Image: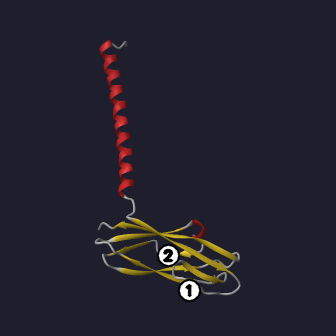
Amino acid sequence: MKKTKKQKKFLGINKMTSLILVLIIILVILITVNLVQILDKPLETQELDVKFMIGKTTGFDRNTSLLVFGRVIPGGAITRKVTLDNNYAFPIKIRVLISQELKNFIFAEPEHILLPGETKEIGFNLIPLQDASFGNYSGRVSFEIREYKV
């Protein structure tokens, strides 16, 4: 059955309308993704350098400006503590990020909620495997601070 000029014109309009609708949906999705990324930016990010040595004996380092564990034997463990403070007038969520080169050695709770004025100590545990290679290791721990919405 042949289509009339009106039917062809109507079908052309339908295709154009569908294309415009798809483009609008794609645009809305892109805008939404960008807004989520903009609105979910941390208030601030703080970083600490991390250093330790794996060796035959245990050794200590009293440096307080870095997260320094000193020397540990393979299969041993050391814990260092870091104090977190909420100086904002609202609750915050602190996300702990450990750099890739340290993920097999350093362990900590990944998220912490602090109320206004609250202080909290968190532990970072260095636990090298029994077959860990001797040597010096370094990396970073980052703290992403965001407003916590209840």
Q: Report the front residue among 86 and 124.
A: 86
Q: Judge left or right: residue 132 versus residue 100.
A: right
> In the image, what residue occupies the spot 61% across and 83% down?
70
The amino acid marked with disc number 1 is: Arg
Work out how far the residue at label 2 is from the one at label 1, CA to CA, in angstroms: 20 Å
Q: Residue at x 37, y 70 (%)?
A: 93
> Which residue bears the numbered disc 2?
108
Is 96 drawn above or below residue 22 in the view shown?
below
Q: Determine the residue positioned at 41% across, 77% down.
A: 84
Per the image, the residue denoted by label 1 is 62
Does 103 sit left or right of 20 as displayed?
right
Nearest to viewer (mark 2 / mark 1):
1
Image position of 109 with respect to 8: above or below: below
Q: Nearer the viewer, residue 139 or 150?
A: 139
Q: Position of residue 144 (x, y in %)?
A: 43, 67
Q: Nearer the viewer, residue 91 or 11?
A: 91
Residue 74's spot in the image, x, y percent?
67, 81
Q: How is the image coloured?
A: secondary structure
The mark that comes first in sequence, 2 or 1, is 1
Q: Residues within 10 Å of mark 2 (few under 14, many from 20)?
A: some
Q: Is residue 148 above or below residue 128?
A: above
Location of residue 69 in the rendering, given as x and y in whole percent from the top left corner:
58, 81
What secondary structure is found at the residue carrying circle 1? loop
